[in-house]
Amino acid sequence: MKEFITACPRNCYSTCSLKVFVDNNKVVNVEPLPKNLATPNGVCLKGLSYVERANSKDRILYPHKRVANGKFKRISWDDALDLIATKLTTLKKEYGSQSVLFYAASGMSGLLNEISGRFWRQIYGGVTAVYGNLCWPAGLEATRLTLGENKHNVPWDLANAKLVVLWGKNPAESNIHEMIPIGSALDNGGKLVVIDPRRTESTQRAELLIQPYPSTDAALALAVANIIIKNGWIDRGFIAENVLGFDGFKEHVLQFTPDWASNITGVPVDLIEKLAWYIGNVKPMTLIPGYGMQRYTNGGQTVRAILALSVITGNIGKQGACWHYANLQSYVFDDVLEPLCYYPPEKPDGITRRSISTARLGLDMINTKDPELKMVWVERGNPLTQNPDTNTVLKAFRKLDFRVVVEQFFTDTALEADIVLPAKNMFEQTDIIGSYWNPYVQLRQKVVEPAGEVKPETEIYYLLAKKLGFTDEQLNGILLPPGDVSVEDFLKEKLALFPSLSFEALRQGPLLAPGLQEIAFSDFKFNTPSGKIELSSIQAKEKWGVNSFPTYDSAIEIEDELKDQFPLLLMSPNTKNRIHSQFGNLEIIKMVSGPPTISMNPVDAETRKIKNGDLVEVFNRRGRFSITAEISYGVRIGCVVIPNGWWKTQGVSVNCLSIGRETDMGHGSAFHNNRVEVIRVNRK
Amino acid sequence: MDNKGFIFDYSKCVGCHACLVACYNENHTQPPISWRQVQPFNKQKVPLSGFINLSIACNHCLDAPCLKACPANAYQKDSETGAIIHHAEKCIGCTYCTWACPFDAPQYNKRKGVVEKCNFCNERLKIEQITACSNACPTGALLFNDIEVVDMQNVPGISQKSTRPRINFKNSEVVNSIPLMDLNASGYSAQKNTRYLVDKESKINALKEWPLAIFTLISSLLVGWIAYFLFDRREPQFGILYATLGFVAMALSSLHLGKPFRAYRAIINFRTSWLSREILLFMFFAGSSLIVFFVNSSILVVSISVVLGALLLVSIEYVYAIADKNYSTPIHSANTILTAVTFGLLLTDYKTIAVGFIVLKAILYIVRYARKDIYTLSVIFSFARFFVGCMMPIVSILLLEISTSLVIIPFIAGELIDRLEFYNELHVDTPYILMNMLPSKVEKL
């Protein structure tokens, strides 16, 4: 049995380091790697389930072609690539290369993903691509506008906080390793305050729980700012030194009284005052916002409003004091950091057409003209589960002539493909990954030879380019020829820029990112136009057309005429059992998670005559499906919760209820603005 | 080695299930079986009540009840690590260990017909590694380290039975941690807040254990029958019926096992297992009573058989004493000794004394019944048990003076119902049950 050190490349805060044991070219066990100070005790249940995932009998190990009645037939690589190459050639000739849509999502991180873009741009000669992102851009942009960049203190600094505020984040499920330093902070006498419509697993040791209606967080934050300023609980020295626009902000928040906010958020005035007291008086404070509340049409302004609380109380740039949104300090290899790299180019070059909004994928695909879309290539993503307004996305997919999906399993998206190509897993090709939470650069090592006939994407593209008639010489320097040597050379070239990072050292474990600030902004340098923290942002106004100060604008659909017809606010957070739509198909995860459920408050259930365990139908104008009701006092009255990531083949496709809209800034996806109704279904 | 064990911290466990997946990886268990479980308390987040999770598996007790209870010696303590190891190849699938363990550690695998259980990652311990579950716990809630073995740890989800488990608990007071929050937003009702619990089949119930109900009932009838010969010295009759009943009892209890062909192993552990003693005594008793019927019915042989029968019934009562009782009377109305005595007396001419015993049974039944949840099926059965099984024999004996068989048949029918109900009135306190029996706090903030 051989032992390797590697790292988990999922779209997850924790980005754990792990030891993996390999026997006879099979992954047989996964163990912790204490060297990573952020994830010292080991990976979560999903990381542990890689043992099943890597060896699952359901894994796609060969190219498949769709045959009649939705079934798939194994075909050879040669046939598969021939079919694709022929199609690509014909489409390019008849409609132009931009009739092909290249769609990749966050399924597997790594520097090698760059090769895909090179193929479509430099080899195929252009393509249509998406801009924006499903995840976090509104909050990233809000932070960038205010602080200049997205970085935060190292996770273990949380133990120094005397006040931890979890604002819309549930790390017990989405970032379990964060519970370690939070626990230490509490053991050291710190206090925990949680703002969340749900009483989550993370609230176990909280002193105060505030449950606003979803999308109203900005109103809450502005009222809290009002109280803090009124009571003089601000850090005058810090503001004078570092903050632009405080006086205007002070005037601006006068209108946002606790009564006003109480009316909007549903939070009693005394609890708003209590929250303001904690934030104003307990220092240092680490404020940890989640990503859910910025997926509303007011998401960016919401995050700016909450961030203002850290700013006026001087909780930036110090030990235990931090705005803990995203830490991009380990993204040292990127030329353009998030969120800027999500934005469509200001001057399109006519080669890659980045005109389709991720948020509106279905609609934009259907409406694209000159040329119309004829083919899609999907890798690292499952848009038919995860993208908003799934029914429209499905319609857009079915309207195409040809669909290629590179996947490990038969997901909802793979099932729609004409050709399914087997995707590598994290153990089958070496790559380098960063993390948006911990400060490490890590090597995701190849520990086994690809199973079956699996080929890494880099190799697929190389072989496809050959089918398109390119020679090895022509591909030299653009694509990577098959084999591990070219991959290592590519990565080593990337590492060469950083003396502290070497391939050999990375093999032994994670390395701190070059230039890391353990305490972010401890130099009090802010990369904003004014060089200060900008409570008032001209950029916000000019780039996104929002108020230069953070404001509360009610989110679309949440406060409108649909209120009576669809009285319940749908929340679709992440569960510990999956990363988006990954892992849910594994036997061990199915056992732990049980069947899909919708959680609702007993009061809402009673008015609908719904009992625990009843089969119910959840619906709005966009879609509907049946699901089992689970009654919980942990869900605020007026809200219902279905964790995202269930597959349609498992009975639930939560995003058929959501709609594709963009957030107020950052080209994020405002797909949490959803009203639904739930009714009991009589079992036959 | 006995000073090493689990340390569980209630304030660090967020119910993430990593321990369970680590166990699955290490031990290749097949879902839905898991050797480790994570039991939540107040998963519904009833307001004014805290919530916790408990990760629990086998605690490799110093006084392991499974090891004592197993009739087939399938459990052994590892001399090096002290791990209590279950050997599937020796297991007869009787599931008696699942009644004995207060931690719900032994899991019955229906497909394989045997029990399986956490092995303390014994092979890992032997090479100085810790258990896979503790090794994988991402928050440090479940450690493996030096412990102080103490009895009766009064913490959520943990039984008060004295087994000296190799586990220590920390920070259980976190169950009282309640945030200040808006009760109106949470759906809190001053009158009634329901905790919806998962319907879990009780480990002991009549539907599952009916062969045992028949086995024990037949045992008491056969013992009573033999005892009757102490009073009636005529030549025994109905020997074939007697032998058939004995055979049926034996066959049913053997076929009830997950591994019927290993039934012979059931007598191996007579030194500590009441179940072994029960089977062994049944065989001795059956042998001696067949001698009474077919070979020699002298008073000496009858007396020996009665003594063996009495010991058999005592051992039956001890077998069931391991379970937790849902009934409040000091003895159950379907107690096997009580049934044997009553039945024996019914066969004699001292039927009025039998009436006294039936009245005692009826009182015990009524006292018990008064505390039960009433639903239609239970009303019908209880009606039958009380009127057919108690009142009919009493009236028949005292007023009608009709033939013995017309008294006996309703009596046995009533006893059968009562005996089946007995199994529904036993349970095993698992961590799941104990966690959910924690009180919900109701005082105002």
Image: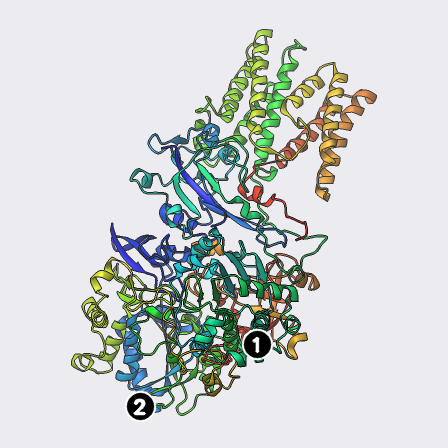
Callouts 1 and 2 close, C-beta under 8 Å:
no
- In terms of depth relative to the viewer, which is nearer, B252 or B61? B61
In terms of sequence position, does the residue under pointer 1 or pointer 2 come before the other? Answer: 2
Badge 1 crowding class, 10 Å Cα cut-off, few under 14, some 14 to 19, many 20 or more, is some
Which residue occupies 51% across, 63% down?
Answer: A165
Checking the image for residue A653, the label placed there is none
Picture coordinates of residue B315 (x, y %)? 55, 22
Q: Is residue A576 left or right of residue A500?
A: right
Picture coordinates of residue B106 (x, y %)? 47, 38
The answer to whether one can see residue B305 in this image is yes
In the picture of the structure, the residue carrying the numbered disc 1 is: A622
Q: Is residue A641 left or right of residue A512?
A: right
Q: Is residue A97 shown above or below A75? A: below
Q: Quadrant of residue A252?
A: bottom right
Where disc 2 sits, the SS reads helix
Residue type at mark 2 is Lys
Q: Chain of mark 2?
A: A
- View extreme (bottom): residue: A370
- View extreme (left): residue: A473
Q: Is residue B244 shown above or below A286? A: above
Picture coordinates of residue A662 (x, y %)? 49, 80
* Picture quarter with the C terminus of chain A: bottom right
Which residue occupies 57% across, 53% down?
Answer: B43
Which residue occupies 60% across, 7% down?
Answer: B299
Asked if labels 1 and 2 share a chain, the reply is: yes
Mark closer to the observer (1, 2) = 1
The answer to whether one can see residue A143 in this image is no
Badge 2 crowding class, 10 Å Cα cut-off, few under 14, some 14 to 19, many 20 or more, is few
In the picture of the structure, the residue carrying the numbered disc 2 is: A93
